[in-house]
Amino acid sequence: MSTIRLGDIAPNFKAQTTEGEIDFYEYLGDGWGILFSHPADYTPVCTTELGTTAKYKSEFDKRNVKVMALSVDGLESHFGWIKDINETQNTEVNFPIIADEDKTISELYDMIHPNASATATVRSVYVIGPDKTIKLIITYPASTGRNFDELLRVIDSLQLTAYHKVATPANWNRGEEVVITPAVSNDDAEKLFPKGFKELKPYLRMTPQPELK
Ligand code: BEZ
């Protein structure tokens, strides 16, 4: 078991997946990634989550994000389950699902929380940046399906704040005003944010969202 925290290097691994053996770093290339775990195959919430992920593929592609799912069942089980996902969710699973039967990767990424379940993974989400560091960790219990709009929203924020000296306020969504990071002086802010800014407090300055790359 390892502990993974924000800013840590995402450990690399080779895995058996529904799209063949994959080296995680090779799969990510120089883009962004999401690695997320599912408690088990043939479970209702996971079925809706994987169907939703497939439907959001174009949104992930737009953001240069590669997605990889993990479940601790075997490949045969995954292939049978994918048929059910495609049928019931009206989609085609279009990303790899890791068959982590020996739980090597689940343990590497601390996806088993023994006081929740000794054997099943919780619903972990890791967002990994192009530098292979962990940018976001969210952990949901088995009984709560993830909000994929929230994942896109956080990725928009991560990508925006990676390239501009801004941060995103509560409930921010793409296109809305952002805050200028406190380390930027007002003189520099005038140059960096040509659309201008409002100073509500010296530490709270709002500016229109710069262009997302
Ligand atoms: C589900 O994915 O539906 C699920 C998995 C484990 C426990 C409860 C629900």
Image (cartoon, rainbow, N blue to C red):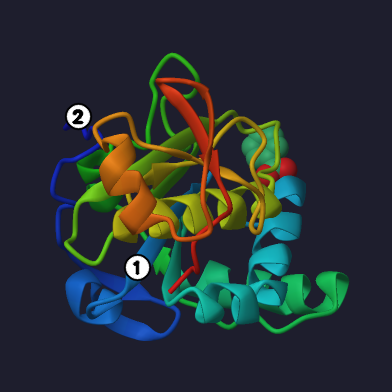
The secondary element bearing badge 2 is classed as loop
The numbered dot on residue 3 is: 2
Q: Residues within 10 Å of mark 2 (few under 14, many from 20)?
A: few
* Residue identifier under label 1: 32
The numbered dot on residue 178 is: none
Is 68 placed above or below 94 here?
above
User: Residue visible at 47% across and 36% down?
Assistant: 138
Locate ligand 1 by image quadrant.
Answer: top right
User: Residue visible at 77% across and 81% down?
Assistant: 91
The reply to whether the C-beta atoms of the residues labelled 1 and 2 are less than 8 Å apart is: no
Return the residue nearer the eye: 157 or 105: 157
Mark 2 close to ligand 1, CB under 8 Å: no
Q: What is the quadrant of residue 162 in the picture?
A: bottom left
The N terminus sits in image quarter:
top left
The C terminus sits in image quarter:
bottom left
- Tag count in the figure? 2
Q: What is the quadrant of residue 5 in the picture?
A: top left
Q: Residues within 10 Å of mark 1 (few under 14, many from 20)?
A: many
User: Residue visible at 55% across and 56% down?
Assistant: 209
Return the residue nearer the eye: 172 or 140: 172
First in sequence: mark 1 vs mark 2: 2
Q: Is residue 176 left or right of residue 40?
A: right
Residue 169 spot, x, y in % from top left: 56, 33
Asked if one can make out residue 103 in the rendered structure from this viewpoint, the answer is no
Residue 37 spot, x, y in % from top left: 47, 49
Q: Is residue 70 left or right of residue 94?
A: left
Return the residue nearer the eye: 200 or 90: 200
What type is the residue that disc 1 sits on? Trp
